[in-house]
Image (cartoon, rainbow, N blue to C red):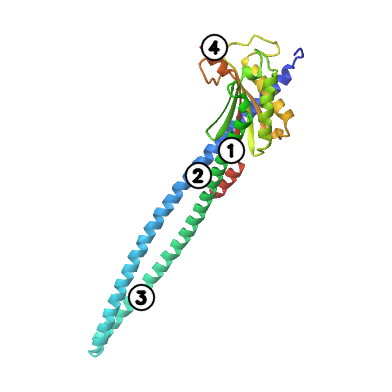
């Protein structure tokens, strides 16, 4: 408590935290981009289906036209047989007409074959895209199920801390573990108390058993200016220091990979209640552990569909 952090080291920590926040924003932007890409692909498939319907209609028209030509050919053939007994001039005229009709029939057959080949290619491409989307939807559903199970596991592990300033909830595809300062810290302090350490240890056990989950630890304060230890300049510094202390406790309480963990200070800028009342300020003084699924596999699947 009496030691001091150099300004350079403190600036480095703040810089790293800012980079981490930017990385989180980039990741969220990537997820939004990929979701937009998924919507775009769905529109492309819809257009392909419309083209397929149009080509199918054209194919039907060509088949009808071919049938008409075939019928006409049969009629002409009958006429040819009858006129064969007539003058050579009439026979020559019918022969010319027949040759013309045969040429038209051959042209129609070639067009029909070309249309059918295009239809077959479009159908194969459409089937591939639908299969990719099906697999992507399945992976997304698996991620959602994983987060549902994670929430249940956390609620069971932290049941002893219900009503003591700890809440577990799920929103926007993430699981949030919110711990008020009354469970973790004394006023103006970043040292975690005994009961807070117990809660973090139980939380760490669940996180260690879910290696595919990224962990963001956010520190939050109310809007009352900080007037404590000279090592801390303001609420933003205090929120960052508290988040870092919780991160260190998680690392020391389990075998979790440090690369999965990020600590960030939000200061007073993301309140969940009004700072006009003591109850609201107490809710705003908190640590939020944000658990999100790793999206690298989903990003790779979306890239293969573009």
Up/down of 212 relative to 4, above or below: below
- Disc 1 or disc 2, which is closer to the eye? 1
- Callout 1 touching callout 3 (CB < 8 Å): no
Q: Mark 4 points at which residue?
A: 278
Tell me what residue is drawn at x 53 percent, y 39 percent: 33
Q: Say which element carries label 3.
A: helix
Q: Is residue 109 above or below residue 168?
A: below
Q: Mark 2 points at which residue?
A: 38
Mark 2, residues whose alpha carbon is within 10 Å: few (<14), some, or many (≥20)?
A: some
Q: How far apart, in angstroms, are the residues tagged by discs 1 and 3?
A: 69 Å
Residue at image x 30%, y 83%?
A: 95
Q: Which of marks 1 and 3 is nearer the N terminus?
A: 3
Residue at x 37% of width, y 64% of height = 59
Name the mark on residue 83. Answer: none
Corner quadrant of residue 286 = top right
The image shows residue 138 at horizontal and vertical percentages of 54, 47
Q: Comparing marks 1 and 3, which lies closer to the viewer?
A: 1
Mark 3 sits on what residue?
A: 103
Q: Which of marks 4 and 3 is nearer the N terminus?
A: 3
For the residue pair 125 and 297, the one nearer the viewer reads as: 297
Does residue 83 appear to the left or right of 178 in the view shown?
left
Residue at far bottom of view: 85
Q: Quadrant of residue 4?
A: top right
Q: How far apart are marks 1 and 2 (CA)?
A: 26 Å
Determine contact: label 1, label 2, CB under 8 Å.
no
Residue found at x 31% / y 72%: 67
Please tell me how crowded label 1 is: few (under 14), some (14-19), or many (20+) other residues with Cα within 10 Å. Answer: few
Q: Mark 1 points at which residue?
A: 149
From the viewer's perspective, is 111 left or right of 38?
left
Q: Are marks 4 and 2 in contact (CB under 8 Å)?
A: no
Which mark's residue is nearer the viewer, 3 or 2? 2
């Amino acid at each position: 408590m009496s030691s001091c952090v150099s300004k350079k080291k403190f600036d480095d920590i703040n810089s790293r935290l800012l980079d981490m926040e930017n990385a989180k924003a980039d990741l969220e932007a990537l997820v939004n981009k990929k979701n937009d890409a998924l919507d775009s692909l769905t529109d492309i498939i819809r257009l392909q289906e419309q083209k397929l319907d149009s080509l199918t209609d054209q194919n039907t028209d060509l088949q009808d036209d071919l049938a008409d030509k075939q019928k006409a050919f049969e009629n002409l053939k009958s006429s040819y047989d009858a006129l064969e007994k007539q003058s050579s001039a009439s026979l020559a005229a019918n022969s010319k007409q027949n040759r013309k009709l045969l040429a038209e029939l051959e042209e129609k057959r070639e067009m029909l074959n070309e249309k059918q080949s295009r239809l077959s290619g479009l159908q194969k491409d459409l089937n591939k895209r639908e299969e990719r989307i099906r697999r992507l939807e399945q992976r997304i559903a698996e991620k959602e199920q994983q987060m549902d199970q994670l929430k249940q596991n956390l609620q069971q592990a932290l049941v002893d801390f219900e009503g003591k300033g700890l809440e577990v909830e799920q929103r926007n595809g993430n699981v949030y573990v919110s711990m008020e300062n009354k469970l973790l810290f004394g006023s103006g302090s970043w040292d975690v108390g005994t009961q807070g350490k117990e809660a973090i240890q139980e939380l760490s056990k669940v996180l260690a058993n879910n290696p595919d989950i990224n962990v963001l630890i956010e520190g939050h304060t109310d809007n009352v200016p900080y007037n404590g230890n000279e090592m801390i300049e303001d609420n933003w510094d205090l929120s960052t220091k508290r988040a870092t202390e919780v991160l260190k406790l998680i690392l020391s309480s389990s075998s979790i990979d440090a690369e999965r963990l990020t600590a960030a200070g939000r200061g007073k800028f993301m309140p969940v209640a009004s700072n006009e009342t003591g109850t609201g300020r107490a809710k705003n003084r908190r640590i939020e552990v944000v658990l999100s699924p790793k999206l690298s596999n989903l990003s790779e699947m979306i890239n293969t569909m573009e």
